[in-house]
Image: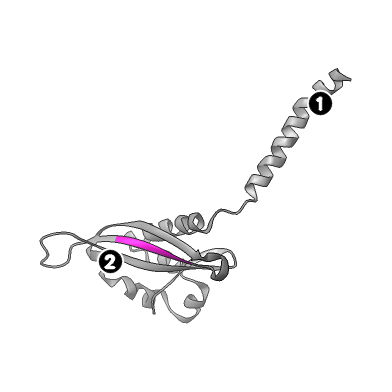
Amino acid sequence: MVRMILRRLPALSLGGLAIFMTACASVPQPPEEAVRVRAEAWLEALMQYDVDAIYSYTDPAYRSAHSARFYSKNYAGRNMWISAALGDIQCDAADDFGVCKVDVLATYRGFNMKEDMTTTLRETWVAVDGVWYTQPRQ
């Protein structure tokens, strides 16, 4: 009997591992992580000023009412940006309302400026059917 159990142990171990991996894969990631992944891709597209790509991250309701060209006006000063990075991501209202706030730290130099300046832009991200989208300022 012991030999029979020992012979089946590798199969039982692999089966247990498969169940464990499936359970881990189905655990949803925290909203801050899900938003960070999408916001980083959005910011990378913004730094390349890929209007179609950044527009694709806007929520479906916004896209149904506004064009990509209209949206791009929100970032008309982007050509003065030297760099940008994500800052804090706060998802205090994620469970109840599907809303997160994302800070974007933009360093820029305007015309006739001798030094770089850094400012923080606060972007709102909303969950729609489990996918996070930026909700542009109106």
Q: Amino acid at mark 1?
A: Arg
If you read the primary sequence from the N terminus, does the residue marked by circle 1 or circle 2 appear first? 1
Residue 42 visible in the shown view: yes
Q: Is residue 7 magenta?
A: no
- Residue positioned most to the right: 1
Residue 49: x percent and y percent? 33, 63
Q: Amino acid at mark 2?
A: Arg
Mark 1 highlights which residue?
8
Coloring applied to the structure: one colour
Q: Is residue 103 magenta?
A: yes
Snapshot quadrant of residue 15: top right
Which sits in the foreground, 78 or 15?
15
Which sits in the foreground, 55 or 10?
10
Mark identifier at residue 32: none
Mark identifier at residue 78: 2
Task: Determine the secondary structure under disc 1.
Answer: helix
Does 21 sit left or right of 136 as displayed? Answer: right
- Whether residue 103 is situated above or below residue 19 in the rendered picture: below
- Residue positioned most to the front: 92
Task: Determine the secondary structure under disc 2.
Answer: helix
Does 100 sit left or right of 131 as displayed? Answer: left
- Whether residue 34 is situated above or below residue 137 in the rendered picture: above
Residue 48 visible in the shown view: no
- Closer to the eye: label 1 or 2: 1
Q: Residue at x 10, y 61 (%)?
A: 114
Pointer 1 with pointer 2, Cβ within 8 A: no
Q: Residue at x 47, y 81 (%)?
A: 65
The part of the chain drawn in magenta is 100-105
Does 8 sit left or right of 1 as displayed? Answer: left
